[in-house]
Image (cartoon, rainbow, N blue to C red):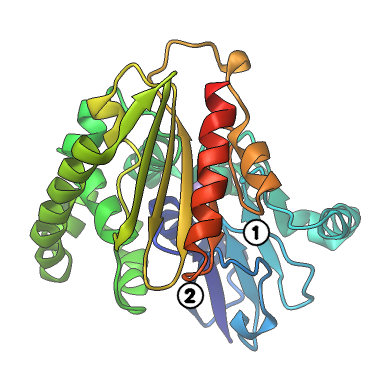
Amino acid sequence: MTFRVLHHNQCFDGACSAAVFTKFHQECIGTASGYEYRGLSHAATGGISDDVFGPGENAIVDFKYTSSPKLTWWFDHHQSAFLTEEDRAHFVAGQRGALGMRQFFDPDMISCTSFIAAVGASRFGFDVSGLGELLYWADIIDGARFDSAQSAVEMEAPAMKLAMVIENADTPDFIPRIIPLLTDMTLGDIMAEPFVREKISPLMSKHMAAMTLIRTKAELADGVVFYDLLDRPTEAISKFIPYYYFPDATYTVGVTRSASRTKISVGTNPWSPIPHEELENIAEICERYGGGGHARVGAISFGPDEVDRARIAATKIAAELRG
Ligand SMILES: [Mn+2]
């Protein structure tokens, strides 16, 4: 039966997680006749609907837990993986039985991709020797471990351009087409595929426009860059642009909207000299407003018509981080 792999949508680590999970499952478990992919996005309403699951086995990778009995495999590394304490308790209870070898959670892993590879290798004898480039870049990109704001924003490496193309995927068949290539080809060769290559130059132009927008609209005060782009719909803006123009900033709070949602993005400057233990926990702040994420970056989604609510919340979060 076809195995459905549900992955964090429009996310480089989500796509790489789906690819590495598939290779792992094929080589170490081998019970599926084929694999299909579907992206999951954070909705303002929060939960995962049972409609997303297929009739056979289902895995969720790099995305929230759900107590649905349709979920068989699960890998996540997000601090906010459990929507409720009931979900967490359900996961913990499952760990004592057979699901302990099917469902895995470790918020200390940099990327879900390297988490799947590590669990596969240590518990199932998965051979990860051909996955070096993919695991390296999943950690760099998902962990925001770039050498500099310049390398993150100027995007010279093929992995960076591929991540941009995945983050901006505009049709539901695009990421499922890329996933099987990720464990089969080098990232440079995937970039050269015509269906991928044609996406790059329009996105690079938008990226340049986003840079101009942040340069002109963002303001730095007391270590926090704030930008409000609610006057126009904008597509995904690289979270590193603020630090390219404001290298002395510690945090960024930005509020943007698209046709489907209004979004607050909160981040920490990855190149900040401030020791980690002195930084605010961004996931905790976002959770208070109904969002989530990691210790260093997080987000809160609102409905497309909740512009005022989002603006007020963003202003409060910026004030909190400044204080
Ligand atoms: Mn991830």
The residue lying toward the viewer, choosing from 91 and 233, is 233
Q: Is residue 112 visible?
A: no
Could you say which quadrant of the image residue 182 lies in?
bottom left
Residue 278 placement (x, y as % from top left): 60, 14
Q: Earlier in the sequence, mark 2 or mark 1?
A: 2
In the image, 9: left or right of 248?
right
On-image quarter of the C terminus:
top right
Could you say which quadrant of the image residue 62 lies in?
bottom right
On-image quarter of the N terminus:
bottom right
Could you say which quadrant of the image residue 206 lies in?
bottom left
Q: Is residue 153 visible?
A: yes
**Residue carrying label 2:** 38
Q: Is residue 37 above or below residue 21?
A: below
The residue lying toward the viewer, choosing from 42 and 305, is 305
Q: Residue at x 71, y 70 (%)?
A: 72
Q: Residues within 10 Å of mark 2 (few under 14, many from 20)?
A: many
Residue 73 placement (x, y as % from top left): 67, 64
At mark 1, the secondary structure is loop
**Residue carrying label 1:** 64
In the image, 2: left or right of 145?
right
The residue lying toward the viewer, choosing from 10 and 134, is 10
Q: Is residue 62 above or below residue 43?
A: above
At mark 2, the secondary structure is strand
In the rendering, which numbered label is found on residue 317?
Answer: none
Q: Residues within 10 Å of mark 1 (few under 14, many from 20)?
A: many
Q: Residue at x 60, y 25 (%)?
A: 280
Looking at the picture, which amino acid does disc 2 mark?
A: Arg
Residue 295 placement (x, y as % from top left): 59, 33
The residue lying toward the viewer, choosing from 211 and 83, is 211
Looking at the picture, which amino acid does disc 1 mark?
A: Lys
Q: Is residue 49 above or below residue 78?
A: below
